[in-house]
Amino acid sequence: MENLSTNFLQQVCNLLDDARKNVKTAVNLSMVYTYYNIGRMITEEEQKGNDRAEYGKYVLKELSLHLVEKFGKGFSVTNLKQMRQFYMIYSKDQIGQTLSDQFENIPTVDTGRKFFLSWSHYLQLMRITNIDERHFYEIEAVKNDWSLSELKRQFNSSLYERLVLSKDKRAVARLASEGQVVESPQDLIKDPYVLEFLGLPEMPAYSETELESRIISNLQKFLLELGTGFTFVGRQVRFTFEEEHFRVDLVFFNRLLRCFVLFDLKIGELKHQDIGQMQMYVNYYDRKVKMPEENPTIGIILCKDKKQSIVEMTLPMNNNQIFASKYETILPSKTDLQRLLEQG
């Protein structure tokens, strides 16, 4: 085979030289655009060969040797294949307009597509074959400034599947274009909540106090699981009513809904008395604690098990303040959740 053209090799090198001249804070994003364009150039160069498969292997091998010699590590054949795959996926892909409008100053590639995350984030996202799911995680990672480890955790906890199972078709469609939109109390709720980061499965038994202590010790991860807009107020928050003292396990405030969110922790099966207790907590906060401009308090009972019929029979039909959700101490099976989605 003839040698790769000097012009082609120089064009790829020029892209990398330009990218590395950018200011340090923009390096990650700049490299994403650069890798996209390298992927495009590799694809276009491969199409010039009569035997595209063989010529493609040759292009990757020769380009890798040249770039490693000039720029050092990071340009193995495997890495160049990832850049080509990145181009192949994202040259035919558009993200939600809302996100693009929010970041007007970010440049676009030839198709009008914008990129908002680091290369490591996109390597993770490229593994997601479902386009809607991939868009959801990209939007959420941008909106919430997820690190790579946070993105991986949300994917491994099947956040997308858990949200889809709790929403109607119209709301599901919004996940792929806008991410998780919080406009009502129901939008905050997950069922189940996944608390694998607490490390409880290795314990043969644990108390509600232990469960609460572990949540507090892993508060940042718990906030990630709760979702957008939560700020921590306190644990075992005491109030006195009719000369009796009561304590709310965990109190948060949600900035998006502008309301208090109370959590009660139960390690066993949910009882109707537990729901009544939470109703009293919520009523107290609504009448004695919240400011007039704030919205009604939300109460969430986290339990290991529940009978939905008991929940529905105990709460009023138009309930939008008290919710009961199960929690899991191990990561759910994505296969099982996807099977439930297909059945639905």
Image (cartoon, rainbow, N blue to C red):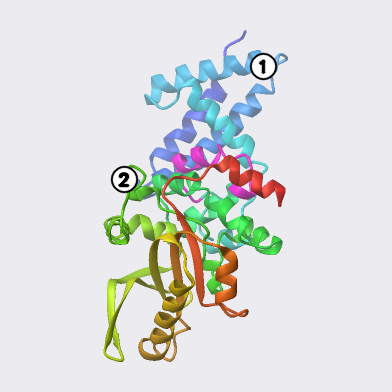
Q: Quadrant of residue 118?
A: top left
Q: Identify the residue at the far top of this view.
A: 1
Question: Residue 186 magenta-drawn?
Answer: no
Q: Which mark is residue 337?
A: none
- What is the x, y in percent for residue 33? 51, 42
Q: Residue at x 60, y 30 (%)?
A: 41
Report the span colored magenta.
116-133
Q: Are marks 1 and 2 in contact (CB under 8 Å)?
A: no
Is 274 situated above or below 180?
Answer: below
- What is the x, y in percent for residue 308? 58, 64
- What is the x, y in percent for residue 169? 70, 60
Badge 1 amino acid:
Ala
Is 81 situated above or below 339?
Answer: above
**317 or 256: which is nearer to us?**
317
Is 87 situated above or below 118?
Answer: above
In this image, 280 relative to 40: left or right? left
Q: Which mark is residue 53?
A: 1
**199 or 121: which is nearer to us?**
199
Badge 2 amino acid:
Met
- What is the x, y in percent for residue 140? 51, 56
Q: Which mark is residue 203?
A: 2
Instruction: Rate crowding at label 2 as few (under 14), some (14 to 19) or many (20 or more) other CA atoms within 10 Å.
Output: few
Q: Residue at x 45, y 64 (%)?
A: 228
For the residues labelled 1 and 2, the Cα–Cα distance comes to 54 Å
Q: Residue at x 53, y 42 (%)?
A: 333
